[in-house]
């Protein structure tokens, strides 16, 4: 249970990073409120997958669950790093448009 | 060959012949694996006849499953041989050379049934030579789209945006073909049309990403902004897409994976021919659509000239 805030933090970083880029894009579209989820949900899926399995392992607890927890955390952190770098690189171009 | 569209048509014809040839050829060349074994009472009228089977039945009431089969039923010191005509939980009736013999299930000490067994050919496996190349090409064309998107962001030239868009359309076509053939196969092999299983789920997510690309394109008015947003989204989407490719190696999945050296020569050669053919088909569709876009551009240009 003590590890849940760690996942929440790592997951939030990924959601915020990609979400900011997509929100900047969707503000300038004709269907603002429905374009964002259409873009956001499929892109978020790998993060969601890792975060959910890590959370499940953290709540179950015990030595057996720790392997699953770290695999889930590896997904989340890997996604965070790659997507934040990509979003950071693209953000300048999107804002400049 | 001079013209791009002629080249594309040649590629389409060649790719079609290779793909279809590999697909149809495997029915004759590559072996048909067995899907499972089927038992029958009589001689199996099948080219894939396996041979006779003989089996002891653990309990007398299981003889109900073997009505019509030959049976040897042993009671206290007495053996009755014949064909089972009727069976229930309590008694079994045998036809022993014209005489009908009924035995109480409680009296049966042992029973052996015999018949024949044959392998059920797994014709559904043949879709492998179509489904897998199509799925691979969908990933490759997605990579091409992401590459042109990157080129567009770097150079801001309209032709790269057009190329990325056309590549994305081809990706969607191939994704839909993969989905259609995959759904047919899961129905044949697993008995269900769809299952929320790692490979299928991530591929479905990839489908949503490609559809979202076109939703995004259609909801931005300004042309330059549309091209830039679409390029950014396709790059982000392509970072997500390979997960579908690798997930079967990370998470236990029902979806089959080809192992290294897992294909026999006829299967491997057919598979490679089908891959080359499908690559040509993908290239041809891309070039033909590209030619159409260029023609549309020229017509628009001519229109503005005439009006002005």
Image: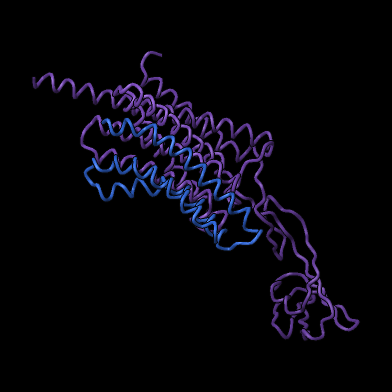
Q: Foreground residue, B45 or B261?
A: B261
Residue B80 as seen in the image, left or right of residue B271: right
Asked if residue B54 lies left or right of residue B274, the reply is right
Residue that appears at 72% across and 86% down? B90
Residue at image point 21% right, 43% down: A30
The answer to which quarter of the image holds residue B4 is top left
* Front in this rendered view, residue B46 or B136: B136
Image spot of residue B98 (x, y percent) = 77, 77
- Is residue B277 shown left or right of residue B228? right
Nearest the camera: A63 or B210? A63
**Chain with purple colouring:** B
Q: Quadrant of the N terminus of chain B?
A: top left
Residue at the spot x=51%, y=30% of the render? B277
Query: Quadrant of the rendered structure where residue B232 is?
Result: top left
Q: Residue furthest right?
A: B77
Query: Which residue lies most toward the left here?
Result: B308
Above or below, comparing residue B221 to residue B151 in the picture? below
Compared to residue B7, the image places residue A17 above or below, namely: below
Image quadrant occupied by the C terminus of chain B: top left
Q: Is residue B101 above or below residue B166?
A: below
Above-or-below relation of B294 to B123: above
Image position of B42 (left or right of B228): right
Position of residue A80 measured from the top left corner of the image (x, y, whole percent)? 47, 42
Please state the horizontal and vertical placement of residue B218, each as a whole percent of the image. 26, 40
Count of marks placed on residues = 0
Identify the colour of chain A in the image.
blue
Q: How is the image coloured?
A: by chain
Residue lying at the far top of the rendered structure: B2
The residue under the point 60% across, 38% down is: B26
């Amino acid at each position: 249970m003590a590890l849940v805030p760690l996942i929440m933090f790592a997951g939030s970083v990924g959601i915020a990073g990609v979400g900011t880029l997509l929100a900047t894009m969707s503000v300038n579209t004709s269907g603002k409120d429905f374009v964002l989820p259409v873009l956001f949900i499929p892109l978020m899926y790998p993060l969601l997958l890792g975060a959910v399995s890590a959370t499940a392992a953290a709540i179950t607890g015990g030595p057996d669950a720790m392997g699953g927890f770290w695999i889930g955390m590896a997904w989340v952190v890997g996604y965070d790093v790659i997507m934040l770098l990509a979003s950071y690189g693209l953000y300048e171009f999107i804002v400049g448009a | 060959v001079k013209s791009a569209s002629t080249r594309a048509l040649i590629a389409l014809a060649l790719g079609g012949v290779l793909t279809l040839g590999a697909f149809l050829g495997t029915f004759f060349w590559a072996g048909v694996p067995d899907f499972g074994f089927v038992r029958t009472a009589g001689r199996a009228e099948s080219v894939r006849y396996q041979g006779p089977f003989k089996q002891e039945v653990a309990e007398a009431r299981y003889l109900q499953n073997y009505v019509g089969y030959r049976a040897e039923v042993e009671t206290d010191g007495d053996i009755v041989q014949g064909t089972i005509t009727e069976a229930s939980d309590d008694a079994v009736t045998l036809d022993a050379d014209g005489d009908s013999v009924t035995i109480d299930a409680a009296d049966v000490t042992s029973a052996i049934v015999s018949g024949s067994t044959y392998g059920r050919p797994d014709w559904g496996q043949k879709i492998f030579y179509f489904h897998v190349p199509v799925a691979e090409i969908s990933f490759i064309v997605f990579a091409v789209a992401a590459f042109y998107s990157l080129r567009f962001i770097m150079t801001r030239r309209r032709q790269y945006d057009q190329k990325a868009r056309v590549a994305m359309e081809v990706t969607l076509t191939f994704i839909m073909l993969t989905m259609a053939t995959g759904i047919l196969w899961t129905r044949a092999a697993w008995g269900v049309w769809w299952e929320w299983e790692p490979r299928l789920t991530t591929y479905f997510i990839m489908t949503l990403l490609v559809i979202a690309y076109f939703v995004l394109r259609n909801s931005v008015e300004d042309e330059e902004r549309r091209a830039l947003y679409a390029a950014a989204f396709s790059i982000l989407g392509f970072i997500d897409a390979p997960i579908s490719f690798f997930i079967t190696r990370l998470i236990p999945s029902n979806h089959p994976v080809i192992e290294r050296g897992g294909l026999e020569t006829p299967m491997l050669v057919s598979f490679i021919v089908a891959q080359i053919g499908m690559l040509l088909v993908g290239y041809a569709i891309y070039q033909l659509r590209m030619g159409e876009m260029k023609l549309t551009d020229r017509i628009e240009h001519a229109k503005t000239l005439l009006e002005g």
